[in-house]
Each structure stands twice: as C-alpha cells, then as structure tokens.
Image: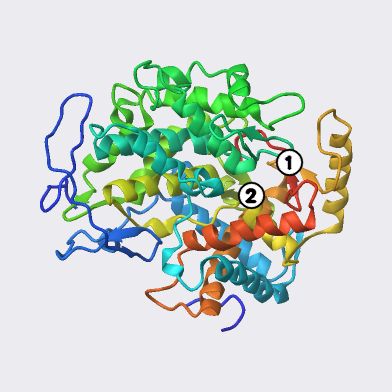
Amino acid sequence: MGLFSRKGSKHSVQAETLSIETDQSRHSKSSPAKSPLFARDSNGWGTPISPATTTGAASDLAAPKPASPTTDPAAYLKSIHAVRERSRLVLEKAKRNELRHFHVDLDKFTDTAAYVVSIIKRDHGPDYDAIPPYGRWQHFDVGGRPRIDQLLASWPSTVDKPERTRRLLDLFVVSVLLDAAAGARWKYKSKQSGKFYRRSEGLAVASLEMFQAGLFSSDGQQPCQVDGMALKQITVDKLAKALQVATDNPLPGLAGRAMMLARLGDGLRNRAYFGGSARPGNMLNYLLDHPTTQMNSVPVIALATLWTVLMDTLSPLWPSARTMVGGISLGDCWPCSSMPSSPPGQPWENIVPLHAMTQWMAYSLMAPMTKMLRIRFSESELLTGLPEHRNGGLFVDTGLLTLKAGDMSRGLAAYEANAKIDGQPNVEVMPLFQPNDDVVVEWRAVTVGLLDELLAEVNRLLGLGRGRALSLSQMMESGTWKGGRELAEVSRPNTKEPPIMIISDGTVL
C-alpha cells in the first residue's frame, strides 16, 4: 500500500418496544428483552444479534444532505459533513508539504502508524472486536473501578431503562462540557475513594460526584439529574468549590466552564428537545419520536438528528467572539490561511469547521443509548477524528509534523511572557498560542485528515480487513489518544503537556 492510499417513516413498535415516559403522558410498553449476544458494526458500536431481520438497518438510512454553502454557508459550516470536507483541503496541502506553519515529513507516517499499532496490540490484542468506541464512559472507569455500573446499581429497580438512560445522558452532557484541558497542576481528590485524579479522568470523577451530590438538580428529592433551573444557578465560585480549585490547585478556563453550564441552562428551555422539566436526557424522547427514526427489532436513529439537537443546543454556549457568517455564530469554526483565500473566494471559504466539543458530545452520548436501549445510529461514520491536543500531539511528537522556525520562535516568546504570570507553567518550555491562532487552527485541521489516513494504515498493519477493521472511534480509543498522551509523558515528564500548548478558555478541546 502506498503512502496515504485509501481504498423511514415515524416508528412503529413491533418485536421489542421501549417504555418512554414524557412530561405529558406515559406509554406503557414492554421492556426490551436482554440479550447477551452483541455484534460490532463498522462504526464500533455494539449492536444486538437478533434472529429477526431488522428492516431499518443503520446502513440503510441515508443521511440528509447538508445545506449548500453557496445558498446557506452558515448552515453548511455547522453541519457534520463540512468538517471532513473542509479539513481535507488542509490535508491535501500537507501531502505536498505546503502547510503555512508546519513542515510535513511523510516518511514518518509509517512509523507513526506502527507506534499506534504497538499500543493497540499491547492493550487489546488480539481481541480487537472488544475495543469500545471512543467516549466519556471509559473516563469514568479510571483506576479499573466501574463507576457508571455502580451508579446504575445504586438506583432502585423501579427506575426503568429509559429513565436510567436519561439520567446517564444528563450526566454525560455536563461532564463533556467540563472536559476541556485541565492543565498539569490541577487534581481532584475523590470524596468516595480519597484518591487523586487528574486531567480528563479527574474531571470525569469530579463531575460524577457533583452529579450524585445534586449540584446540577433543582429537585431535592432527585439529586441524580440535570435540569436548566439548577444549571442557571452555577457560578464560578460554586464550580470552583466543587472542583476543589485553589491557588495551589488551578484549573485553566474555570470561568469558561461555568459560563457554558449556565448558558446550557437557558438552552434547555427548548421544550421540543428537552420537555417541560428542561433535562438534557429528555432528548431521548425527541430522538425516538423523530420521523426519521426507525424502530423494528432495534431503534435506528439518524446521526443527523442527534447532530441537529446538539448543534442547536450548544451553539449559544460558545463565546460571542467566535467566527460569524451572516451574523450567525459558528462555534468551533476558524479562519485558516491554508484554506482558499477570500477574495477571490467567498468569505466562508477560508473557514475550517472542527466542532470538536460537539463531536465529543455525540461520541459520548451514543454509548449510553446503545448500551442501555440497544439504539443504533446510522451514518455515525460522518463523525471525524477529534482535533484535540492528544491526537494532534501524536503527529508532532512522532516528527510527522514540525512547527516552522518563525512560529516556534513566536510561540516560545509567548510562553516566556506567560510564564512570568503568577501560577502559570514555567518548566519544560513549549511554544504557546491562543486557540484562534492560525498555527493552532491549521494543526487541528490537518489532524482531522491525518487521523482518517492513519486509520487505513493501522488496519493494514493489524491485518484487519472488511468486517473486522477498526472504526475511527475505536482507533482513537485504543491508540491515538492514548499514544499521544504516553508520548507526552515520556517527552515532557514534568508537565506531561502536549508539544504545543494552547491557552485554554475552557471551551475548546
């Protein structure tokens, strides 16, 4: 293989049905039968093996086409389709070593793939089918403790599967929103175990214990839920106390995280998505009732339906200074010098959409719906690799990408200036940039494309062909994210930071 080569209607309940309680009524239906047999589909999601043929198979549902960029560029740039389509333009420049800020050494591509394969074989071989999809669930289980399973077991048997799923969706939504870079100094001491946890896993454990304590619920009789009324009461001070933030235990972007939770409280007023109780988990009702959802032996929800809910809900959360087209804020979309210039192109053409937090949310929310209610998602392969610091750091630490000299000097000068601020990092000097810097945008955009290319090579090296090949989600879970973190730990043992640092505002992965 050469380098970079690549090879409906509203549901009716039949064989198995779900009991879905809305704010208005309860539909009494039998609960799904338990089955120990699960198959891994092409996207890494476990799906039940049923003797009956599912006529609404996930692969048979065609996703709606995105809006045309010429007639509605804002809607197009907010679509999931645009992420891969636009970032591929940056990848093509990378293949020609024509990036503005990075030298690209394609000879290191095979070495990078071999390193990722070694991580996957070490931790999962040869049972690659058992690799879970990428998502927040695994972070809760840090230290080998199955915290989500324990949480489920703590609820009385009278709580049915749909409500259990809603509660997990409640938890996962706030946990993902809190999961921007935590920095090298912050740690969280679990109130349950007394152990300390850091980074993403620390934020996961902290958010779980906050959830169990009722911080996100306005109902004193039901702490294990999230609702808009409680979120609107979240302040920086309240969040700092819950996350144990102190002068000697700083968490970057604390104010941004508090702002997003409070704004989410307003967004949950959308009754169509979240019902009168304004709970994130009520999106389950909307998704199952959507006209495009098929429900025969298993429910099949179009990814585009979930994406619309998330994009509509999360868009108002982002800072007002984000990129806009036609007066519409685009969220995690940024001008990039490696994109077609404007003029002569249209103003939207120099913007690359990434939507990392929204994609991280989608990956994470699919897991509880799949595990609890056997829901499948059609077109989930539209989700891309996440352009965040572990995946992106992997390509820098393996030498595939090297920051150009001028940008390195500028980034090091920014680090030196930032290090003079009390409480900021001042060891293991690395280039430092703002999230909207063209260096960071190009780095994140090329990461999306490189992860696609890496997947084909990783599967080739593992000898996994059609039917057994890892999904992009599984590769991130078992290889690239973990591999990027481990390289950071070896290369920068004091801070374990990525090779390029980003000043975190708590809203960008």
- In space, the residues marked 2 and 1 are separated at their CA atoms by 39 Å
Measured along the vertical axis of the image, is residue 306 above or below residue 210?
below
> Dot 2: what SS?
loop
Of the numbered discs 2 and 1, the one sitting upstream in the chain is 1
Position of 354 compared to 402: left or right?
left
The x, y position of residue 279, in whole percent, is 36, 27
Residue at horizontal 58 percent and vertical 37 percent from the top: 203
Q: Is residue 509 visible?
A: no
Residue 15 image offset from top left, x and y in percent: 11, 53
* Frontmost residue, 226 versus 248: 248
Q: Look at mark 2 in the image and give the residue it sits on.
A: 342
Vertical relation: 18 (above or below) 50: above
Drawn side of residue 265 relative to residue 251, left or right? left
Q: Which of 318/464 is in front?
A: 464
Q: What residue is rendered at 51% in x and 39% in y?
A: 176
Nearest to the eye among marks 2 and 1: give it.
1
Write down the residue under mark 1. 184
Q: Amino acid at mark 2?
A: Ser
Q: Residue at x 72, y 67 (%)?
A: 400
For the residue pair 163 and 152, the one nearer the viewer reads as 152
Q: Residue 15 shows which numbered tag?
A: none
Quadrant location, the N terminus: bottom right
Q: Which amino acid does the dot numbered 1 rest on?
A: Ala
Query: Which corner quadrant holds the C terminus?
Result: top right
- Locate residue 246, reporting x and y percent: 71, 24
Q: Are marks 2 and 1 in contact (CB under 8 Å)?
A: no
Residue 488 is drawn in which quadrant?
A: bottom right
